[in-house]
Image (tube, rainbow, N blue to C red):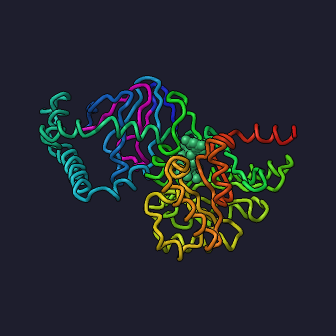
Amino acid sequence: MTPPRRMLRAGEVLFAEGDAPTGAYLIEAGELEMSTVVRGRRLVLSRLRAGELVGEMAVFDDGPRSTTAVALVDSELYAIDPEQVTERLAKTDPVIRALIESLLHRYRSVVRSYREASPPSAFDPEPSFEQLRGLAIARADAAAFDQATPTEGVDKLRLESELRQALADDGLDVRYQPILHIASGRVAGYEALIRWNHPERGPVSPMELVGLAEESALIVAVGEYVFDTACRAVTRLIDAGAEPSPFIAVNVSARQLQHPGLVQRIVERVEAAAVPRGSLKIELTESQSFDDVQVEAAIALCHRHGIGVALDDFGTGYSHLARMHRLQFDTLKIDQGFTRALLDEPRVHHVVEAIVAMARALDAQIVAEGVESGEVLEVLRMLGCDYAQGFLIGQAERLDHLVERLRAS
Ligand code: C2E
Ligand code: MG
Ligand code: MG
């Protein structure tokens, strides 16, 4: 993957008028001057500073660059992958899309007609720019347009570019939370949980990271990173003497699953890593947006390659029962909400009891998430739950720590 950060020296041209469009940039530091040539004279259109976008038209359409962008001082930019925008644009309200397309179309045609029509003598750099803008977008529209370029959107684009950079720089991390086999009292496996320690913001929650990555194709690269890392982790744990040979469960969201060929690629990566059969599992999260046909095909493919499939956060969202007879999950992970209320609410106790009985009948295993106390673990044992995961058993840890501990024992 090409790292998105780009440094420009003062005087360096980012792109020139007429160039093919290669994407947009977010200015992180420095200043750029945008200009165009009208009847042989250079007209400065604007100066763009940190926090502003440059060349953004290129991600909307593939018209040639209508301006030249030059760094006035040493500048730092983040490339915006056109995919970051095009997928959002494709999913956006058709009315908004039409508005953007019409604004762009108008802007480009005004620039063109101005260039062709304006007599050199009437040329005056300052008013001309006003004229350009004024013609392109009526003043009222322009005010609305300025307001409609919310910092939230720019912040999101920046964070996404930083996430791509973190992926390219090995700046992401995967932690492993132990899963206890209750009957034997041994750790049977681990759940891989992604971590990103942002240089300025500190830790970014995995929910935010995954949610952000899911808005573009970036989620594919993030998912592959977690799978590759988890495969290497399995090998290291086995080499360090983990007994019995552990499994690692990797989370896959419904949105990830929608990317064509994703499960096929996961399977290929697991095969290429040559980890023992059964040592990689997937956990399907956010069941509310599952497409059952897709999930069924994914489960079948995984099973052919010895990859177990768990339904995460069972009992929440739309993990409805009609699905249970059709989809052959190997494991149901009882959501933390049930585990937490297990001691205090008798009805929850009955529900968990019923879930365990159902899982038995369907030949699926049960993992209770969010186990934080010994009393809860005892109740789960009595109910016949197979596995427990939670702070009582252990937090998500670095692989190095796990390996050191295994070697020491
Ligand atoms: P999840 O798959 O249900 O993972 C369990 C979450 O509960 C983890 O939060 C874990 O740290 C937390 N947890 C574990 N034991 C306890 C406990 O005893 N008490 C409490 N209060 N919390 C506990 P985390 O790491 O913040 O992850 C949140 C969610 O983000 C995950 O929920 C999963 O849906 C998603 N996620 C994490 N890593 C990935 C990934 O690589 N890919 C995808 N698609 N999603 C991921
Ligand atoms: Mg999970
Ligand atoms: Mg869960």
Horizontally, is 356 left or right of 211 in the view? Answer: right
Which residue is rendered at x = 51% and y = 31% of the image?
Answer: 7
Residue situated in front as seen by the camera: 182 or 408: 182
Horizontally, is 378 left or right of 77 in the view? Answer: right
Highlighted range, magenta? 13-39
Residue situated in front as seen by the camera: 380 or 219: 380
Q: Main secondary structure of the magenta part?
A: strand
Which residue is rendered at x = 83% and y = 50% of the image?
Answer: 242
Up/down of 85 relative to 52, above or below = below
Quadrant of res 140: top left
Residue 284, position as x, y percentages in the image = 55, 60
Residue situated in front as seen by the camera: 120 or 153: 153
Q: Is residue 205 magenta?
A: no
Up/down of 2 relative to 200, above or below = below
Residue 207, position as x, y percentages in the image = 49, 45
Up/down of 32 relative to 305, above or below = above
Q: Is residue 21 magenta?
A: yes
Q: Residue furthest bottom?
A: 326
Which residue is rendered at x = 51% and y = 60% of the image?
Answer: 351
Q: Residue furthest top?
A: 73
Image quadrant for the C terminus?
top right
**Residue 322 visible in the picture:** yes
Q: Residue furthest front?
A: 346
Residue situated in front as seen by the camera: 224 or 42: 224
**Residue 194 visible in the picture:** no
Residue 222, position as x, y percentages in the image = 57, 50
Horizontally, is 228 left or right of 58 in the view? Answer: right
Which residue is rendered at x = 44% and y = 30% of the image?
Answer: 28
Residue 139, position as x, y percentages in the image = 12, 37
